[in-house]
Image: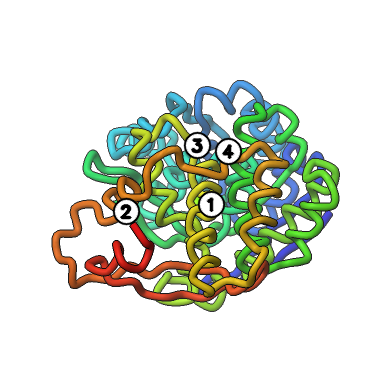
Amino acid sequence: MKTVHVKTGRSYDILIGHDILKNAGEYIRPLTKAIRAVIVSDSNVSVLYADTVKKTLTEHGFDTSVFVFPAGEENKRLGTIEKMYTHFYEHNLTRTDIVVALGGGVTGDMAGFAAASYLRGIDFVQIPTSLLSQVDSSVGGKTGVDLPTGKNLVGAFWQPILVLIDPETLNTLPDTFFRDGLGEVVKYGCIKSEALFERLERENAKDFIDDLIYECVSIKRDVVEHDERDTGERAILNFGHTFGHALEKLNDYSGMTHGEAVAAGSMILTRISEAKGMTEKGSSERLQNLLKKYGLPTDGNYPLEDILAATRGDKKSTGKSINFVFLKKIGECFLQKVPIGEFGAFFGE
Ligand code: MG
């Protein structure tokens, strides 16, 4: 088992190990005096793992119930949170009890937000089951829901008391979701670790999955510890995301997964920055080869002008700037603001 310790406003451990899911109660018990626990899970994941987690929690003295919501980003909304609160109330959760998020990013974001706000905040545990949530969204304490007007517009910074990552859960993950997570994995290599990038080039990601999760989580931990509230350095985690979000929007949030959009976004940006002499020569070719190796897109299939228009979005004032993350080289990045009014000239539209 590997442990990553996170020192934020409230410190906690991330445990990575095979079969820790079925022993979850053993790891959670010493951290809380809770009598009751509610497991929050979606309709896909609950079928696979809710019984296992409920059993181990019960064995360790938690009066446990399970709240299940229909799977899908379209259910990441306040209506689902309200149903969660009702379930918490009916299960008599008090301020000293706990919520356990069991599932992917949508589940973690929502269960975390419900925990952050119910009775003005109760403890919660993250048990991420998708690669994307294991390497990215379960670490860092961002929780929230979407509004009809945009993603993640309501939420809170709320750190878990423990994160349990069991790589065995990835064996039940369809390939498309594995690729989704790899988009973020490649990002970590690009911005902070040439060693990770090289290993992804040399070996197959699935063959060193424990190390891979450990490396990504450690990188995110380092960044988040310096900037818990996302006012500075944490922005580097958005590498590939600005154009990525534009591509997700152009695809109506259904044609491309988040990880695929991030991959394509990072590729488009790096091609341009290398041509402008901002990025070491050869970087975009290496990135392209790696993305291809893992079946990730290297293009957005939209003209640059459409991507730039979607990036500008409804930001009417062209005096405003967007903070982009560029690669200096593979493993090293920097932030640079580009005024919206200068997009055309800067990106060579
Ligand atoms: Mg992301």
Residue of label 2 = 308
Q: Give me the C-alpha separation between circle 3 and circle 2.
A: 20 Å
Q: Which of the two discs, 4 and 2, labels the residue nearer the N terminus?
A: 4
Residue 137's tag is 1
322, 236: nearer the viewer = 322
Left or right of 278: which side holds 192? right
Question: Does label 4 point to a residue whose CB lies under 8 Å from ligand 1?
Answer: no
Query: Which circle, 4 or 2, is nearer the viewer?
Result: 2
Is 262 rendered above or below residue 217?
Answer: above
Secondary structure of the residue carrying numbered label 1: helix
Residue of label 3 = 257
Q: Quadrant of the C terminus?
A: bottom left
30, 209: nearer the viewer = 209
Q: Which of the two discs, 3 and 1, labels the residue nearer the N terminus?
A: 1
Q: Give me the C-alpha separation between circle 3 and circle 1.
A: 15 Å
Q: For mark 2, does the 10 Å Cα neighbourhood hold few (<14), some (14 to 19), or many (20 or more) residues? A: some
